[in-house]
Structure formats: C-alpha cells, structure tokens
Amino acid sequence: MYFVSISKHVISRPAGISGLFGRRFWYCGCAVLAISAAPALARTEAGPAGTAPGAKAKAGPATGAGAKKTRPESGLEQITVNARRRSEPIERTPISMTTVSGSEFTERGITSIARIQDMAPNMMFGNVASNAGVANAAAIFIRGIGQTDFSFGVDPGVGLYIDGVYAGNTVGSVLDMIDVANVSVLRGPQGTLFGRNTIGGAVTVSSLTPNDRLSAKADVKYGTGNRINARAFVNVPLARNLFLNFSVGSFMQDGYVNQPYAERQRKMGNQDTRIFKGAILWHPVDRLTVTLRGDYTRDRSNGAPYVVIGIDPTLSGSVVALNNIAAGATKANWASCTLPGCYGSKYFSKTTNYSTAPNYSNIESWSASATIDYAFSHYLEVKSITAIHQTTGQFAQDRDSSPIAINDLWDGYSEKQVSEEFQVMGRALSSRLHYAAGLYYFNQSGADINPGNKWVEYLESGGYFKDINYAAYAQATYSFTRKLSVTAGVRYTEDDKTFLPDQYIVWGRAPYVTAPPGTRIVPYENFHNNNARWTPMVNVAYQVTPELMAYSTFSQGFKGGGFTQRLTKIVSAPPSFRPESVNSFEGGLKFYGLDHRLRVSASGFYVFYDDVQLLVSDAATIGPYYTNAGSARIPGFELEAQYALGDGWMLTGSLGMTDAHYTKLTAKVSGLTLNSKFAMVSKWTANAGVARTIQIGRAGTLTPRVDASYRSRYNADVNSINYAPLFQPEYILVNASLRWVSPDARYNFMAGVDNISNEKYMHWGSFSASVNNFMASYDRGRQWYIQGGVSF
C-alpha cells in the first residue's frame, strides 16, 4: 500500500524491537555473552583464515581479487591477490589496485566499507539518496566513472563483488563490516574477467573462510551520537573435514539533522542495522572444496540526512514559483514571498529539515551462495559459483523539506537476482602458460514503484524490470622469458533488459494538468533494450629487477544501456539510452624492496569515454532523465607507497589525479558545456598516515596513529548539471587514534577521533529546475569513539 494523498501527514515507520534503549541493551548483552563464552576457545590470528587439513593451500577466493596478507618479522605485510584468477604477489600483478585487510580496517577503527575511499586514490565511495530517500545506496566512482542512481533502469559503473558474486544493484551496498578478510579496489576496466559494468573498475569484498581452528572474537564501540557498534565472530571445526563460522553485528547511532515537525522529532541520518552471516566449508574428498555462505541484513533509518539550502530566483515557471503565486505572491516577488503558504528562506538550513511528510528508509536483504571447487591436478582447477540475492525496501522523502506539499516521493522496491559462473583455471607448458576461462549467467528481476506528489500533479511512476545477461570469457598469460610475459583476453556479453512501466496520473491541478486521472504516461507494455559487446584486453609485463616490475595495458569495457524510469510527460515509449564504453591505455611500475620494507606502485592512464550516460534535469521535464550525453577523455595517474621505517614506525600515502573533461556533447543536453565538471569527481585525491607500534614491556603494545585524506573541489550534484551552490570546496580530513593490545593479543582497547577539524562537507546535492530547490546532504562532522575487543 502506498500513501497517495497530497496533504502532509506524519507517518511512523514499522516498529522493530520496542524501545531504542532496550534494543541497544539487548545487542550489547549479546556481544558481552559472546565474549564471556569465548575463553574456552583457542586464539586465532586476525585476517583471512588458513587452510584445512587435506585441503590444497589457497591465498584467497579465486573468484575475485581476494587477498591474503602475512607479516614477516620486520617490514611490510606480504600481500597475495587473486585479481587474475590465480594467486600471485600484489607487486607481481600488473594491475593498478589497492588491497586493505580486515585487520587493517580494525586497526584504524573503521567498520564501514565506504571508508575505503580514504585509502585508495582516485576513488569515491559515497552513499547517495537524492532520488527516492533510500539511506543506503552505494555510489562508487573510480577514475571519474561511476553512477549515482540505484534505479533498475541504469547500471553501476563500478562493479561490486562480494565473495566472488556480482551485486547487481546498489541498494544496501554500503556495507558494515563484521567478518571481512580484505577489500580490494581494481582500477580501470575489468571487462574480461569481471564483465560488464566495471568500466571504472571493481571493488571486491572477501569474507573470512571457515577453518580448522576453534576461535572467536568480539568488540564493542561507543561514540558520538550514542553510537553503539557490537560485533561477534565464532569459528568452529565441526568435523575433520567440516568447518563453520558465524558472525553477528549491530550498528546503531542517533541522527544529526533536526526534524522539528516529525513524530518524536526524530533526527535524520541515524543508523539502526542488524547483520547475520554464516559460512560452512566442507572437504568431502581431498581435491574438492564446497563453501556455502548466507547472510541477512535489516536496515532501518529515519531518512537520509538532507536539507534544502536555497532556490533559484530566476525560475519563474518552476513549481515553487507557481505555489508562491497561488499563495498570494506576485510574479515579481514570488522568490521573496513571506506569506504563510509561500516556500522560501524560512525553510533553508544546513542542520534542520522542516518536513511534515514522511522521511524513512527501511531495507531487508538476504543472500546465499554455493562455491564448488575441484582441482583435477596442480595444473587444472574448475569452479562453480551459484548465488541468489533478494532485497526489499520502502523509502520516502519530503524533498521540499517544508510543511508545504510541493514535492514528496515514496518508493516500493523489490529485487531478486540469480547468478551462475563456471570457471576453468590452470597452467601448462611447464607453467609458462596460465589461463582462465568461464561462462556466466545473470538474471535479475524486480519492481520499483514510485508514487510522487509534484504540486501540479500526483503521479504513479516506476514499473517492473528484468535483466538477463550471458557471457563467455577467456584470458591467458604466457611467459616468454623469466622477465617478460604477455596477457591477452576477451569477453563476449549479451545483455537483455525489459521494462514494463506502470505509470499514470493520479491527480492533476488545473490549469497546469488537464489530462484526467488514470491517464497513462507511457503505455503499459514491455519495452526492450538489448545489447551485445566484445571486450578485449592486452597486457605486457616486464620484471626489470627482482624488486621492480613495469607493465602496460590496453583494455575495453562497457556499461549496459537502459531506460529512464521516472517519467512525468506523456510519451509513446520510455526514453532509452545506449551502452557507454571506454578504451583505456595504462602503464605502471611496481616496486617491493629495501628488505621488504618499501612498497611503491605508480600508474598512468588515458581513457577514451564514449556515449557517456548522464542523469540530467531541465526546466521542461519534471524529474531527472538519462541520456547519452556525448564523449569525454580522462587522463590521470596514481601513486601509492607504504614504508616500514623500523622501530615500529609505519608510513603510508597515496596521490591520485583524474582530469575528466568532456570533448563532445549532444545538442539535446541542456545545462552542460565542455567545461562542465563531472559529478562527484575530484581532480586530486590524496591520503597520508603515520603510526608507531611501541612495546611497553609486559603491558603489551601501544600504537598511536594519525591519518589524513584530501579531496579537491568537486561537483556534488548527482544530476550532473553544474550549479554553484552544489560545488563542494576542497577539504582535508584528519583522524587520530590510540590502540592498546595485550601481550598475548587477546585483548585490545582503542580511542579515537575522526574528522578532528569538524569539516561539514557536502556528500551529495540535487537540483531539479522544474521544482526549484537545492537539496544537500552534509557530513555529521567530528566524531569520537572508544572501542574494546577480545579474541581467543
């Protein structure tokens, strides 16, 4: 059922466990019980689990870029990755990539995957809620390419893979981490092994794998805004060849954007998330491994944290102008009207939302997967990955942030995806040839129904979607000498999308809308957008010295075409758009030396970006729409370094430059010029960190740490058009922490402050010229926390 009245009401979201304090007390109690029960268990190391008896050794999930990290007695961690479907050291992998282990996230006090953007250059991992109010929707950009909208009609530009399974939609993808082994960021098109929708790159998340050691760990964090995070993890060997792990997490925090007219004055930007995950690993015979995984997440929110910061006084034909004139303003002073029914500056704020219509975001999701891996020999391995995922959500957003019924949206969302991937991996010719090939099937279906009030009319929008994708790929690396190797690969993809729009006028305000209620905006019939593409890649790598590698890569990628989902004008067919594509040229160097104390990687790239899909908005269309806007070029570079100085000192840092600019725009795109800035893309990104582990005798170790990240000025408007109020100036974030670990590493305690300088930077903004209000979402600002943990 959807709320369809244009008058404003306060509607409470579905209740969970009664009482905010009671819920927090209950989950903290669970964590304490887990810790209390743990002394009977044997201690395990943090990070990726080891291998079970009788199983072949593995460095991580061969389905993605999973990594294994081990730390020598002195120096840097040794990182082994699987970005090319085989285990190899990261410094010998000719790909520009960043890998962060779960233990490193813990050492920095990080529990959200979005913080990976503070460690990887040329990356933005945002949470964007501009078009429907969803409070958890990932907007990931790498090297200037990404996507800000979660609708079925458009695909992501950066692929997100969780334990080798592609996440087809971004709702619920800003993950809270409870059992993460590592996160890897692969920059540049990954169109051969990873497939479509990775034209910017890919992010892979690998969970801890069950192993043969009885172990457990748990931690609790308390901080700003009554923040309470509680996590617990247990690993249990059930039999000689059967192992289980299970984890649970609760993430809670009060909101920070005031809502004086909301029920109980609930603040927006809060968090109320529960996560349950489990995995079983079985070795029925020596060469066969079966891994079963499942998870469930429930996410509740009072609404994404947004405010309205102004209007454009020149748009006299906008909905805001029409409302104010109807309330008694003249055509000359509508923008400055202060009459009771007028919309104006009394509702503009950076800290307060004056909504009376509902704001909420409720998401539930679950998934299950089965990975079957069989090694015929040391030279041939086959793998099957079967997965199912389902998400449902209810969202609402009072976009005018006022008691006046100008623009309110509701969203009923449901999505189900099924995927199957079959992989063959091996080596031949005295191990001079390594190869990987596979077949891939993906089936996604769902509904996204969007009732909405836009003052002049009330519309039912959205519809039903189906996306079927088939692919076959092959990639091989041949070592001509011990130093020179060449890799070549190709992938063929067929992508078939179907859209059944269910969109009609519920009510119209005369004289602006004359069509009768029930008039279809677009025919109620299936529309198709089918595409097929080949995406090749070629790489040449040369090991200059044992410590230094050089490489060069050419690769192609594409992002699927689609439909504009949210329509307002009566048309004979929903506007569709073609796939966008990239041709990328990259060269790089990787160094790992000085007795394993220094790791440096550098890469430069030049991207030809064609048929760019942009979400734009103009005064003639109520609501944003998608189009192939033209072409662009993106040159840039990345530089990363880690240096273990000795005596416990560690230095890290990176620098990235992305010079994204348009070279051609189609005539139908209004509001953009060749000088317009890309949405959400900073030209410069950088980070630096320093830490020192101090031995304090029998008391254990103490590690003070300071990290800083920098982003240059960027356009925060998710609809791509450049508006001065929605540009975020450059800023620097500084975080500091102090972590104590007991001598046996069983207990740890941490205190820290994030965003020490209290930067209230803009995460995202949105402006629709037809409605005429600037929406913005700002950061919470400075946050402090304390955290205690135990492991056995």
Image (cartoon, rainbow, N blue to C red):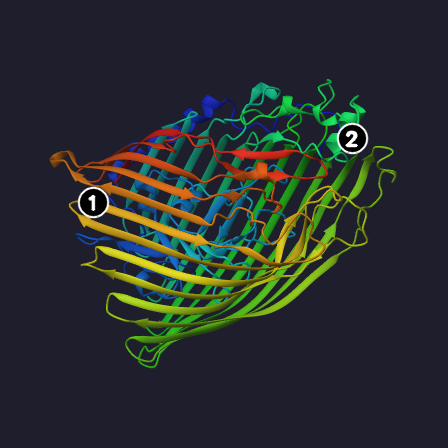
Q: Position of residue 361 (x, y in %)?
A: 58, 35
Label 1 element class: strand
- Residue 460: where, in percent of width, then height? 75, 40
* Residue 46 image point, x, y percent: 28, 46
Q: Amino acid at mark 2?
A: Leu
Closer to us: 35 or 255: 255
- Earlier in the chain: of badge 1 and badge 2, it is 2
Three-letter amino acid code at the position of disc 1:
Trp
Residue 183 shows in the view? no
Label 1 sits on residue: 649
* Position of residue 761 in the picture relative to residue 548 (left or right): right
Residue 697 is drawn in which quadrant?
Answer: top left
Contact between marks 1 and 2 (CB within 8 A): the answer is no
Quadrant in the rendering for residue 582: bottom right
In the image, residue 584 sits, relative to residue 233, either above or below, namely below
Q: Quadrant for residue 216, please give it.
A: top left
Crowd class of label 2 (few under 14; some 14 to 19; many from 20; radius 10 Å): many
Disc 1 packing (10 Å; few <14; some 14–19; many ≥20): some
| Extreme residue toward the left, this view | 697
Q: Label 2, on which residue?
A: 322
Of residues 369 and 124, the one nearer the viewer is 124
- In this rendering, the answer to whether 780 lies above or below 388 is above
**Between 676 and 504, which is closer to the camera in this rendering?**
676
Q: How far apart are labels 1 and 2 at the CA level?
A: 63 Å
Tag 2, which secondary structure? helix
| Image point (74%, 57%), residue name | 527
Query: Is 425 drawn above or below residue 99 in the view shown?
Result: below
Residue at point 31%, 35% (across, down): 736
| Circle on res. 325 | none
Residue 700 picture location, percent across and down: 17, 36
**Side of 125 relative to 99 (left or right):** right
Q: Is the N terminus in the top left, top right, bottom left or bottom right quadrant?
A: top right
